[in-house]
Image (cartoon, helix red, strand yellow):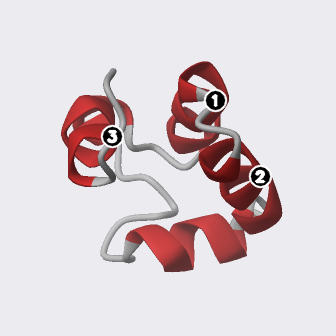
Amino acid sequence: MESKFSGMTVNERLYVGGLINDFDNALEQKNVEGIKTVLKKVALNEAIVEMLISLGIDA
């Protein structure tokens, strides 16, 4: 089954999902669990660890 977020960038997924502020807040606080939760909501389960590493946050 294809996700409604297929073909979108991370920012597009966060915007469409109404989660961009939640993500920004979690990122600012370096809240790893909060970041993971938001990314899972926009169908990025498999990419979470790689994204955290690219953001300079230890997963």
Q: Residues within 10 Å of mark 3 (few under 14, many from 20)?
A: some
Q: Are marks 1 and 3 in contact (CB under 8 Å)?
A: no
Report the residue at 72% width, 66% height from top.
20
Q: Quadrant of residue 14?
A: bottom right
Label 2 to label 1: alpha-carbon separation = 8 Å
User: What residue is disc 1 on?
Assistant: 31
- Residue designated by label 2: 25
Q: Within 10 Å of the Cα at label 1, are there few (<14), some (14-19), or many (20+) other Cα atoms?
A: some
Q: Picture coordinates of residue 12 (x, y %)?
A: 53, 79
Q: Residue 51 placed where, x, y %?
A: 28, 47
User: Is 53 left, or right, of 26 in this rendering?
Assistant: left
Relative image position of residue 43 (x, y in whole percent): 45, 43
Vertical order, 54 against 1 (above or below)? below
Alpha-carbon span between mark 1 and mark 3: 11 Å
Location of residue 3 in the rendering, given as x and y in whole percent from the top left corner? 44, 53
Dot 2 surroundings within 10 Å: few (below 14), some, or many (20 or more)? some
Classify mark 2: helix, strand or loop: helix
Q: Residue at x 33, y 35 (%)?
A: 48
Locate residue 3 relative to residue 20 in the image: left or right.
left
Please name the amino acid that badge 1 sits on: Asn
Mark 2 touches mark 1? (CB < 8 Å): yes
